[in-house]
Amino acid sequence: MQSDSRYITLDAMRGFAVMGILAMNIIGFAMPEWAYITPAAYGGDSFADRAAWAFSFVLIDGKMRGLFSLLFGASMMLVIERATINGQSATRVHYSRMAWLAVFGLLHYFFIWSGDILFLYATIGMIAFRFRDWHTERLFKWALIIFAVGLAIWGLQFGGLQYLQFIATQPDASADLARQYRDMMDSTDFAFNIAPDLAIHRGSYAQIVQDRLSDWGAPFGLVLQSVGETLPLMMIGMAMHKSGFMTGDWDAAVYRRWTMRLVPLGLLLTVALAIWMAAAQFDRVTALAIFFFWGAIPRLMLTVGYAAGLILVIGHLRDHPMIARIAATGQAAFSNYLGTSIIMTTIFYGYGLGLFGHVNRAGLWGFVVATWAIMLLWSKPWLMKFRYGPLEWLWRSLARVKLQPMLR
């Protein structure tokens, strides 16, 4: 019974995470890229839109992706342990899985949606494997060290940018400095460029793919940009699995204590950041600095706090029918993640219904809730008949170079 509980805990957490990721990815599906960073760029005009932004920013943004990273690390350890028990080469099994995941990620990025995280996870997963034999304390320690180094790099970059903005916008700023600042803000890196983004995503499929292929190095750039946060989170997930935390083996009081230590303070800090952004009128420099630097520690706190809280809730409601459906959604997370991309790009891109940029932030929640319902409705009946989700089966078969049994 304890073994069943463990799988239900991990799968249900993965279900919550993949549903939560959609709640933030919906902005990337439906609006220009800058809209994800600041509502001043697009889709933030009405009170309802600002309220939708604040809700997502405080409760969801980055936390569900972080939770997914923790679970990826924990699941990686589970696969390694199973391979070892079955007398297989853990190294071969792991790198075969990651190599095919990277292929799926690149296909996803170039031919379906540019917000892919699969290639990132595959690449970072190859690095994290090197730490599989580390004990729990060492994993935690080095995860925090790597996180701190990455945070310091972002702090130097965006703290310096904020300082430049401050001195360049003072009344007594030199004309040279003011011009340098204006030129930087008008550059392609900082300009919103909404019109070209709208034109591309309201265009044909060939046009969209050609635009992505013209910037073929973007997935690799994302790895460099995200390694300082994603790798530590995977390492923490690995440590959580080794310690029994992630599988629900700890006492409920411990999970409750960690939830109360991390979630209230993390939310308070995130609310303060939201107020700061609003007070700065959603200025792009402030928004970028908060996204990459100032929000990192509260995100980490809430990611771990959410994990503890979800384990507590899942433990209490383990026999509830809804938990079974969420667990099935998590068991088929790969299929649900890629399936969501196919559905949403078909709805919003020009080769589908062409709704890109036409639905406000508050209205997008209708698409989120409807897709959640689809995930919950199809996953459990499918898995009652089949061993794996369709893409999980394909990934497993490719990684093992053998068709896997599908029917239960």
Image (spheres, rainbow, N blue to C red):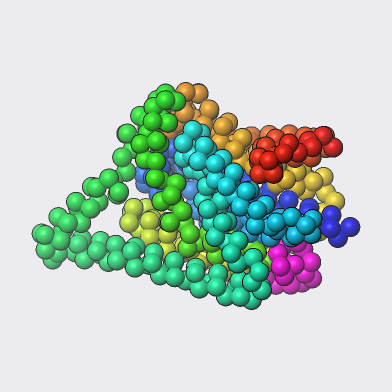
Q: Position of residue 106 (x, y in %)?
A: 50, 41
Q: Considering only vertical position in the picture, is 79 above or below 328?
A: below
Q: Is 376 placed left or right of 291 in the picture? A: right
Quadrant location of the N terminus in the rendered image: bottom right
> How many marks can you see?
0
Identify the residue at horizontal 31%, vertical 40% (top origin): 193
Q: Is residue 265 visible?
A: yes
Q: Indicate yes or no whether the magenta region holds residue 335.
A: no
Describe residue 333's horizontal placement relative to residue 324 as left or right: left
Nearer to the camera, 94 or 257 = 94
Q: Residue furthest right?
A: 1
- What residue is at 11 percent from the left and 63 percent from the top? 174
x and y, in percent, of residue 316 in the image: 81, 59
Image position of 144 with respect to 95: above or below: below
For residue 134, side relative to residue 43 (left or right):
right
Splitting the image into 4 quarters, where does residue 203 fall? top left
Q: Which residue is situated farthest in the left direction here?
A: 175
**Residue 395 appears in which quarter of the rendering?**
top right
Q: Is residue 253 magenta?
A: yes
State which region is magenta: 241-258
Taking depth in this image into account, of 294 and 272 the one nearest to the observer is 294
Residue 271 visible, this orientation: no
Residue 256, percent from left and from top:
72, 69
User: In the picture, which quadrant includes the C terminus?
Assistant: top right
The residue closer to the viewer here, 362 or 257, is 257
Residue 175 place in picture, x, y as percent? 10, 59
Tell me what residue is drawn at x 42 percent, y 25 percent: 206
Residue sitting at 58 percent across and 64 percent down? 130
